[in-house]
Image (cartoon, rainbow, N blue to C red):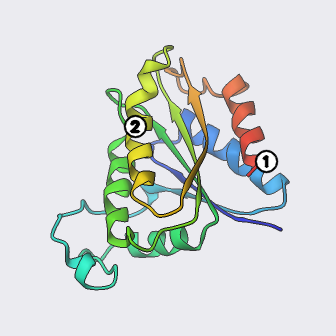
Amino acid sequence: MAKKVLVVTGSMRKGNSDALAEAFAQGAREAGNDVELVRLASLELGFCRGCDYCQTHDGVCVLKDDMAALLDKVQAADAIALATPVYYYNVSATMKTFIDRTYARVGSIADKDFYFIATSYDEGDASTDGAFEGLHGMVRCFADCREKGTIRGLGMGPRGAAKGSAATEEARRMGANV
């Protein structure tokens, strides 16, 4: 049975993390899944204010931007892949904004498979550890969600480094096995 797969990219430019996200999406499509790729940079997203309005208004945020529609997609998805470049050993600001804004629906995001992709200029695994820790932390807040796989795109400083890389093929294979 085909799954609804949501792929979310957190780079401000179309770079290496987007290339890996696109490879993941391609693999998922080739396997017969219904796939949507969303670039956070193309959306209008404000920062969470921590006001808790959403917690007393059925997940409706006080901010009127593109996040409500994106949260609907998150809730409808069976599997979610999150791709981010690593900035200072953490997720990008756009991905962090996405993570923070899922708080509006924290009680109703459940029973999902999550996949994580992080690209780093550095070649060591430790360069992506902080990014993955932030992504793992988000998933721990949701009920019955599973982390199904991670990809470390290491040594991807130059634009285009993902093209033809082992990480790109790994992303395609992981997407095909959603």
Please determine whether, in this image, residue 20 is positioned above or below residue 158. Answer: below
Which residue is painted at 83% across and 68% down in the image?
Answer: 1
Q: Position of residue 175 (x, y in %)?
A: 72, 47
Q: Nearer the viewer, residue 146 or 162?
A: 146
Which residue is painted at 58% across and 61% down in the image?
Answer: 112
The answer to whether any part of residue 66 appears in the image is no
Q: Residues within 10 Å of mark 1 (few under 14, many from 20)?
A: some
Q: Position of residue 99 (x, y in %)?
A: 37, 54
Q: CA distance from mark 2 to mark 1?
A: 25 Å
The answer to whether any part of residue 14 appears in the image is yes
The amino acid pointed to by label 2 is Glu
Figure quadrant of residue 57? bottom left
Q: Residues within 10 Å of mark 2 (few under 14, many from 20)?
A: few
Determine the residue located farthest toward the top in the rendered image.
123
Identify the secondary structure beneath mark 2.
helix
The amino acid pointed to by label 1 is Ala
138 lies left or right of 149: left
Q: Position of residue 167 (x, y in %)?
A: 67, 28
31 lies left or right of 109: right
Which residue is painted at 32% across and 65% down in the image?
Answer: 103
Figure quadrant of residue 79? bottom right
Identify the secondary structure beneath mark 1.
helix
Please determine whether, in this image, residue 106 is positioned above or below residue 163. Answer: below
Q: Position of residue 41 (x, y in %)?
A: 42, 53
- In the picture of the structure, the residue carrying the numbered disc 2 is 133
Q: Disc number at residue 176?
A: 1
